[in-house]
Image (tube, rainbow, N blue to C red):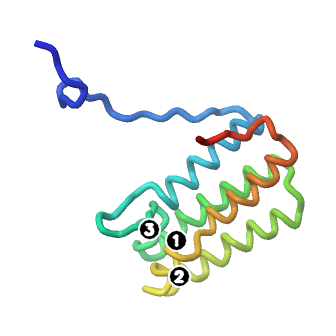
Amino acid sequence: MKRDAHDTATARPMTMTLPTGTDPTSIRQRVEAVEFLLERSLRIPGVKVPIGLDGLIGLVPVVGDIITTALGAYIVWEARNLRLSKWQLTRMGANVAFDTVIGLVPLVGDAADFFFRSNTRNLKILRKHLDKRHPETRVIEG
């Protein structure tokens, strides 16, 4: 009996491997994966705006904010490894700090996670740098 690709008996869990290198391409892939996970990985039926773990983890008082701040700081740390300018790193750090401070305010901070996406903003800064200084890391989406 031939099994269909949608058959649960043959279905395999989705896996994703991230590169561990220190080259710009590996760093870009890791940062893009973290940003996607934090900002756009989940869809709520009936709502067109994607959410990520940042919005969900942020619902847990204090601990959630610590975790999301650490993950946002990881993106800034990777940017530092790529030698972004002090101005760019300051902007990225300010985005994480603003997201953290606003996230500490009950309810307001949770709602702000849907509108102020610090990790997406920081990814945009990082991509601009990489596209200019390391164009070989660019991925053409089609």
Is there a contact, CB below 8 Å, between mark 2 and mark 1? yes
Query: Dot 3: what SS?
Result: loop
Query: Dot 1: what SS?
Result: helix
Q: Label 3: how many residues lie within 10 Å, few (<14), some (14-19) or many (20+)?
A: few
Q: Label 1: how many residues lie within 10 Å, few (<14), some (14-19) or many (20+)?
A: many
Q: Nearer the viewer, mark 3 or mark 2?
A: 3
Task: Indicate the position of residue 52 as horizontal and vertical percent values.
Answer: 46, 61
Task: Indicate the position of residue 129 as horizontal and vertical percent values.
Answer: 82, 52
Total number of numbered labels? Answer: 3
Whole-Å distance between the Cαs marked 2 and 1? 7 Å
Between residue 133 and residue 68, name the one nearer to us: 133
Task: Indicate the position of residue 13 as horizontal and vertical percent values.
Answer: 33, 33
At label 2, the amino acid type is: Leu
Whole-Å distance between the Cαs marked 1 and 3? 21 Å
Between residue 21 and residue 126, name the one nearer to us: 126
- Residue linked to disc 2: 104
Image: 15 above or below 43: above
- Residue linked to disc 1: 65
Q: Label 2: how many residues lie within 10 Å, few (<14), some (14-19) or many (20+)?
A: some
At label 1, the amino acid type is: Asp
At label 3, the amino acid type is: Val
